[in-house]
Amino acid sequence: MATTLSASPSRQKPISDPVRRRSAQGRRRNVGWLFVAPFGIVFVLFLVAPLLYALYLSLFNKGLATGTTFVGISNYVKAFTDPNFLNGVAFVLLFALVLIPVQMAVSLAAALVLDAFSSLFVRFSRLMIFLPYAIPAVIGALMWGFLYSPSFGPLQQIFGANAPALLSPSNIFGALVNVVTWQWAGYYMIIIYAALQGIDKSLYEAARIDGANGWQIAWRLKVPMVASSLVLIVVFALIGTLQFFTEPEILAPISNGSIQPNTTPNIYAYSQAFSYANFNYASALSFALGIVVLIAIYIFMFATRKRGSILS
Amino acid sequence: MKSPQFAPEASRFRPRGNPGSTARALRGRGAVLPYLFLGFLIVYFLIPIWWLFVASTKDAQDLFTSPSALWFGKGFNLIPNLSDLFTYDEGIYIRWLLNSVLYALAGGLGATALAVLAGYGFAKFKFSGRRLSFSMLLGSVMVPATALVIPTFTFFSDLGLTDTIWAVILPSLLNPFGVYLMLVYTSDAVPEELLDAARVDGAGEFRTFLQVALPLLRPAIVTVLLLSVVANWNNYFLPLAMLSDKNLFPITVGIGLWEGQASANNGGGYSLWGLIIAGCLISIVPLVIAFLSLQKYWRGGLAVGALK
């Protein structure tokens, strides 16, 4: 098509020729596949294939004496009756229930303030709040681990001998909530902020003429307008939290046993795979966790009955 | 080829952050409380980084005995600490640093190239099977990278690919969210008429993409590139599972290794803690600089993800 048309710059010609037009469109469809294909290959090789292979593995067992045997769903039955796995699931569910509201409150409040005011200080705050997103979770967890620790952190200097042991079994939950909030609140803030910036400003003028003050505009107008972003963020936070791995894994060596190899389902699956070379069971645990995540998202979506556009 | 002349005009289609005009009206009136709140947030978000910087200027003794954890000690030993860091164990930290750069750039550039192509393909062509592949894409956005680590490890392990650089680079080419972001941005920023004009002028599909569409997509490309590079630079679970040769470790896994050794030493590992602190500081510098200097790009790009 390219060569024939370049000779005649008229736009009318191809349109008046239905046969050529249809074949050109057919060719364009194929070109679409060419653009998508490289990603499609990566998608199949590094997402579909590993998942199918792990699903296959999860249906078998490997014993030293018995060799590899097909066991059907018995690895899943084992997972859902394994107290180590179930305790981990309970931990991450509770963690999500506490973490997500805290995180949402911080990021929503910050985004609303940053949206309502504008000055050099406000722009500087926006960058500083977002900064932890650029810091690896490993480093974030380590820095807070140092701040919590009695020998490196400021707590002993502030509280003396009564300094709270933030990494003790009774405090580790809050300590982890703090680390993750610090790490991700800025990222969520930026997403909410971007959505706020997209609202038509004339709505605020209209509301002000109707006598609304700044707080009312924030709560009655802005928050409902960004509700779909909020739903989306909660879904992503939920998925990420149920897969919790890096922060507890990094804090484990300095926590004096507050974090165990079964604290979260992912750490448990990791230890099954790498400490016990039990890949069949580890694969089953990965899928079992996936099932829990799906159920959790479904319950959340059902409860809010409101869909982020990415899901619809 | 008319396209170059179109480009500056079409760039008006780019969604831009609008500096709040109503915001200016609010400034100064009852702003004390919000400003206090922001001040508190700045302190909260900067404290760990401040501690890290202060601690990396202390020598091994000062680290444990200095009267304040949040203020400088007796001497300013940042340079000696860094030279300890770079020479320890035959300069293994520099190796880790270079590995991190390799994994982040190779994975990030590859993932971005794939995302730009696929996003354009999805946005501008009605090929057969588009609906099905699009739903699969959306479904996979919901699968976090963490969930894929153990399945990918078992798969690679049987292919004999573990403990190579490919075990880290290849899986990080997968970035469904990047494809989604590019798709949304392409639909907005590349007008159909512009592509048709280029086609009528005789440009082939690939040339139309390269010369007409690509320049319009620059802000989104920078955003996806930055997000992929960050995700790879910060990745821990995947390289931890895949690699056992410490010469292949990225910084995150390397520092995790040191942390394990230092805690197992139970106080004998004083010098190692100093290395860990300096190593943490160096590891956050490149990305912080990248984010601060490229902020006008990623802000616009993230806005697209949030609005659609």
Image (tube, coloured by chain):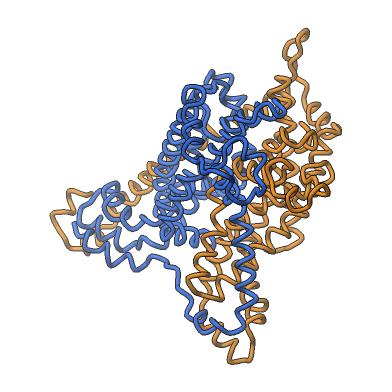
Whether residue A42 is visible, yes or no, is: no
Q: Which chain is blue?
A: B
Check the image and report above or below for B184 versus B92. below
Which residue is nearer to you in this view: A7 or B28?
B28
Which residue is nearer to you in this view: A213 or B285?
B285
Check the image and report above or below for B43 versus B17. above
> A173 left or right of A26?
right
Quarter of the figure with the C terminus of chain A: bottom right
Q: Residue furthest front?
A: B74
Q: Quadrant of residue B237?
A: top right
Q: Residue at x 39, y 54 (%)?
A: B124
Which residue is nearer to you in this view: A89 or B41?
B41
Q: Residue furthest top?
A: A65
Residue B278 x, y percent position in the rendering: 54, 38
Number of marks in the rendered image? 0
Q: Which chain is orange?
A: A
Whether residue B289 is visible, yes or no, is: yes
Residue B308 x, y percent position in the rendering: 53, 62
Residue A63 x, y percent position in the rendering: 76, 13
Q: Residue at x 28, y 52 (%)?
A: B208
Check the image and report above or below for A71 versus B292. above
Residue A25 x, y percent position in the rendering: 34, 52
> B139 left or right of A282?
left
